[in-house]
Image (cartoon, rainbow, N blue to C red):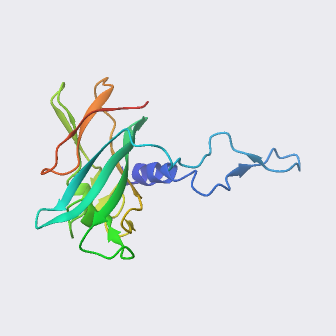
């Protein structure tokens, strides 16, 4: 299972360098690998909401959007765009993902759930002990107004469904009928 996690995580980031090439073995110039690519971070969110990150600080908000929810073989990857708007920090101070997602010192993957209400199933972020298949809360951050990008990996749906509800935090409204891309 852990090898699968490493392989899947590696595949998620396979296109990030932009230098993925293959040679024809004939001494010719390298050619771009047809399967490689770079994540489109300019993509619009499928759905988004602005939430209060911490009820004790109602002026600290974040806009959280789903960029995509994609099934690839045995896993499903949720990609998020999170933009902080925290009144409690200066515009040059970085807000980390955990703060923006309302989990503070906890790991943000703990709260995420995908809900298949039609088949009465709930999916949580894949983990093995303390290893999570998701962005690290304290390693991802952005200043006010700038987006940060996060991901979480779940098991692929057991049933043939086209959409699912996303619960980002138990105190926030769910994002309903988020489309699944296969």
Q: Residue at position x 21%, y 53% from top?
A: 51
Q: Is residue 135 visible?
A: yes
Please indicate, yes or no, whether residue 130 appears anywhere in the rendered image: no
Decide: is 23 above or below 159: below
* 144 and 177: which is toward the camera: 144
Q: Residue at x 24, y 60 (%)?
A: 61
Front one among 118 and 103: 103
Q: Residue furthest right?
A: 27
Decide if residue 87 is on the left or right side of residue 22.
Answer: left
2, 120: nearer the viewer: 120
Quadrant housing residue 107: bottom left
| Left/right of residue 144 with respect to residue 31 in the rendered view | left
Callout count: 0
Q: Which of the 4 quarters of the picture holds residue 127?
A: bottom left
In which quadrant will I find the C terminus?
top left
State the residue in front, 133 or 64.
64
Q: Residue 101, percent across and down?
A: 25, 59
- Residue 173 locus on image (x, y percent): 17, 44
Residue 132 location (% of width, % of height): 31, 58
Where does the image place residue 47, in percent across and percent down from the top left?
33, 40
Residue located 30% across and 53% down the image: 63
Up-down relation of residue 8 to residue 131 (above or below): above
């Amino acid at each position: 299972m852990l090898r699968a996690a490493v392989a899947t995580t590696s595949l998620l980031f396979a296109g990030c360098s932009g230098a993925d090439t293959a040679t024809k073995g004939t001494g010719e110039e390298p050619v771009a690998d047809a399967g490689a690519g770079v994540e489109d971070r300019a993509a619009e969110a499928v759905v988004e909401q602005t939430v209060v990150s911490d009820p004790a600080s109602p002026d600290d908000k974040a806009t959280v959007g789903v960029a995509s929810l994609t099934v690839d073989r045995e896993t499903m990857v949720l990609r998020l765009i999170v933009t902080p708007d925290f009144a409690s920090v200066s515009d040059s101070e970085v807000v980390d993902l955990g703060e923006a997602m309302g989990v503070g010192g906890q790991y943000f993957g703990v709260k995420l759930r995908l809900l298949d209400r039609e088949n009465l199933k709930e999916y949580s972020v894949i983990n093995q002990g303390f290893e999570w298949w998701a962005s690290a809360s304290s390693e991802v951050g952005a200043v006010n107004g700038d987006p940060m990008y996060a991901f979480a990996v779940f098991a692929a749906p057991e049933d043939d469904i086209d959409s699912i509800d996303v619960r980002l935090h138990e105190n926030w409204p769910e994002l309903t009928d988020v489309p699944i891309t296969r």
